[in-house]
Image (cartoon, rainbow, N blue to C red):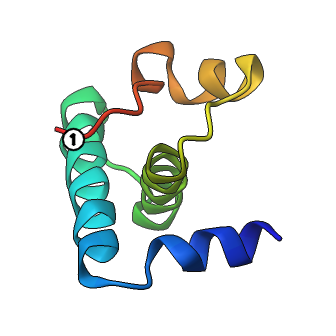
Amino acid sequence: MRKAMFIALLKDGAGVAALGEYVSRRWREAMTDLQQDSVVLFDEAAKVLDLAIRDRAHVPLSEAQAARHGAARNTPSPA
């Protein structure tokens, strides 16, 4: 069911473009938030994509997820 709902959001160019905006915004936030000399790109990309897809689908983070990602990152509106 969730997969079908997500795929429905990407049926047209506007949906893909909107997701791209969410991903771009989340990458900018992630780069600003990183205070480390090095990161594991796969792990950071997984977080960014998770947040962007949730933003696009208007699915909020649980309290535990918000704590893991950082409370400031639970902002679902696009840039």
Question: What residue is shown at x 40% (from left), y 63% (from top)?
Answer: 41
The residue under label 1 is 31
What amino acid type should be assigned to the residue bearing mark 1?
Met
**Relative to 77, is 58 on the left or the right?**
right
Nearest to the observer: residue 72 or residue 6:
6
Query: Which residue is at a point 25% across and 35% down the rendered structure image?
Result: 29
| Residue at 33% across, 63% down | 19
Q: Could you say which quadrant of the image residue 50 lies in?
A: bottom right
Spot occupied by residue 6 in the image (x, y as percentages of width and height): 60, 70
Left or right side of 26 for 53: right
Pick the residue in front: 73 or 14. Answer: 14
Compared with 13, 32 (above or below) is above
- Depth check: 76 or 35 in front? 76
**What is the x, y in percent for residue 65?**
69, 29
Q: Residue at x 40, y 25 (%)?
A: 75
Q: Quadrant of the N terminus?
A: bottom right
Q: Please tell me how crowded label 1 is: few (under 14), some (14-19), or many (20+) other residues with Cα within 10 Å.
A: few
Q: Residue furthest right?
A: 1
Residue 16 in view (yes/no): yes
Whole-percent x, y for residue 66 in the image: 61, 22
Tell me: residue 66, above or below residue 22. Answer: above
User: Is any part of residue 35 visible from this angle?
Assistant: no
The image position of residue 71, as x and y in percent, is 50, 14
